[in-house]
Image (spheres, rainbow, N blue to C red):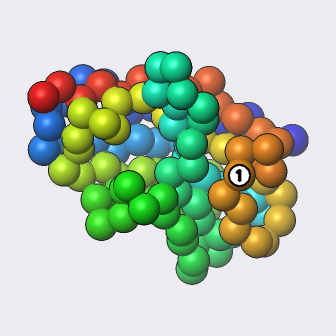
Amino acid sequence: QVQLVESGGGLVQAGGSLRLSCAASGRTFVSYQMAWFRQAPGKQRAFVAAITVSGGSTKYADSVKGRFTISRDNAKNTVYLQMNNLEPEDTAVYFCAARAGYLLKLVADEYAFWGQGTQVTVSS
């Protein structure tokens, strides 16, 4: 079991940057693959980025490649999402998710644990 708490969301102008953090409880963080998803109003939850247990492998949605970076600090039980060159289309609630296992999964249904979400709003 793991509990996730996101932080770092807010309002930013287009072209700006934000860094989201997701703090995980429990001593088994190192055995969880982590991911970020987002959900815009009226849309389904969508994959953003994922990172393996070791942090050695990552995957990104095409829409954020080159702008977003996922990373993790296993000593701090925290995963991050650095978001640069933000666009109005990035406006959404961003969720941190965790799943036990070592293979990168990009589908929300594969993740058993979720945070409460943090709002990111990008103004034009």
Give the residue drawn at x 23%, y 41%: 87
Horizontal side of 90 relative to 74 (left or right) equals left
Please say if 30 is above or below 55: above
Horizontal side of 55 relative to 121 (left or right) equals right
Quadrant where the C terminus lies? Answer: top left
Locate residue 68: give its quadrant.
Answer: bottom left
- Viewer-closest of 23 and 115: 115
Name, please, the residue furthest toward the right.
1
Whether residue 76 is visible: no
Q: On the image, numbered disc 1 is attached to which residue? A: 107
Give the residue drawn at x 60%, y 35%: 45
Quadrant where the N terminus lies? Answer: top right
Whether residue 115 is visible: yes
Badge 1 crowding class, 10 Å Cα cut-off, few under 14, some 14 to 19, many 20 or more, is: few
Please say if 102 is above or below 63: below
**Residue 104: percent from the left, percent from the top?**
69, 68
**Residue 119: percent from the left, percent from the top?**
42, 24
Q: Amino acid at mark 1?
A: Val
Name, please, the residue furthest toward the top.
41
